[in-house]
Amino acid sequence: MGPNAADANVLLGNYYGITGNLHTILGGIAAAVHPGTNVDYRQGFLLDRENINPTDWTTGDAHKAQAIIVAMGLSGLIEGEEGEALASPTKSDRYEMGLPANQVNYLKKLRAAGNKPIILVLTGGSPVAIPEVHDLADAILYVWYPGEEGGTAIADVLFGNVAPSGRLPITFPRSVAQLPPYEDYSMKGRTYRYMQEEPLYPFGFGLSYTTFAYSDLQVSRKQVRKGDSVDVAVVVKNNGKVAGEEVVQCYLTDVQASVPAPAYDLRGFKRVKLAPGESQKVTFTVSPEAMQLVNNNGEQVLEPGDFRVTIAGAVPVKGLSTWGPQRRSRRCLR
């Protein structure tokens, strides 16, 4: 279901060449199902406005299926730097960070019509604030603008041919109210490094069909002299029943900085593939340069004091356990 299921334009955003090999989300799903499986498609609703015909012909039929896949979100008609988005009243910007209201309204009706699983496939090129949608859907796959083979790749994830292992390269706030004023050029509250509030989905976050556990965090030395590097290692275990890839992330915090410093600063990441029950030791080297900061005189210096190293599956936030077990280990350096 949804306006983006059969639309090839959402595969490419608005920066692309010409290709005749476009695999839509609907096409990828139809090609991946077993013989004898029926894929019933209804658009159901428009991209960014309410249907002209007020009669709802689709939400009841949808719950006759075993599962409902809804492809919606943003497109080059709503955001972008050229084409229709540039000619829109917002001049390629958006009035709000959420999805168009008609999309959320349709999802509410779909949820109210029955209890079949609703899998949401969201397209877009920017963060969206979707706390309400998070509660309505059973699963959310944010696919960005996935490219010419996007439909094939999405079907591979939906049907379990591969376990998802993507991680967010940006923070998804709960609302625009969590963002600092646009004219404020300080870093206070900006990005995962300085944000103090709990976002909807933090930087580095992503789920899989399996779960991972972190243990036995070790550092090569607890006291570091000027010019020394320190090795930090952790054991990562696949606790699930399917193979999966984890993106292990190493964050550094200057606990006693003399100037405002990031709450968390990503200093390395490694992708590891683990079979069910398999464990692997992952090691990062924190260099002296990684512990430096720029003081009020514009000088890059290494100040004495305590540093905290956190190795995790996403930048740590208070509510992360809402979507899965916390995957992190911490240790202090001095």
Image (cartoon, grey):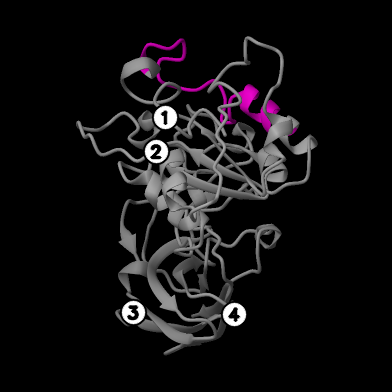
Secondary structure beneath dot 3 equals: loop
* Amino acid type of the residue that numbered disc 4 sits on in the rendered structure: Asn
Q: Could you tell me how far apart the alpha carbons at marks 3 and 2 are, in whole angstroms?
A: 55 Å
Q: Please tell me whether mark 3 or mark 2 is closer to you in this view.
A: 2
- Tell me the element at label 4: loop
Residue in view at x 36 percent, y 37 percent? 11
Query: Magenta segment range?
Result: 86-108
Q: Does residue 245 appear anywhere in the picture? A: yes
Instruction: Compute the Cα span from label 2 to label 1.
Output: 6 Å
Q: Give the mark nearer the N terminus: 4 vs 2.
A: 2
Which x, y percent locates residue 45? Answer: 60, 23
Q: How crowded is mark 4: few (under 14 residues within 10 Å), some or many (20 or more)?
A: some
User: Label 3, on which residue?
Assistant: 226
Three-letter code, disc 1? Asp
Amino acid at dot 3: Lys
Nearer the observer, disc 3 or disc 1? Answer: 1
- Residue 103 location (% of width, % of height): 62, 27
Q: Name the residue under label 4.
A: 239
The residue to which callout 1 is attached is 7
207 and 32: which is toward the camera: 32
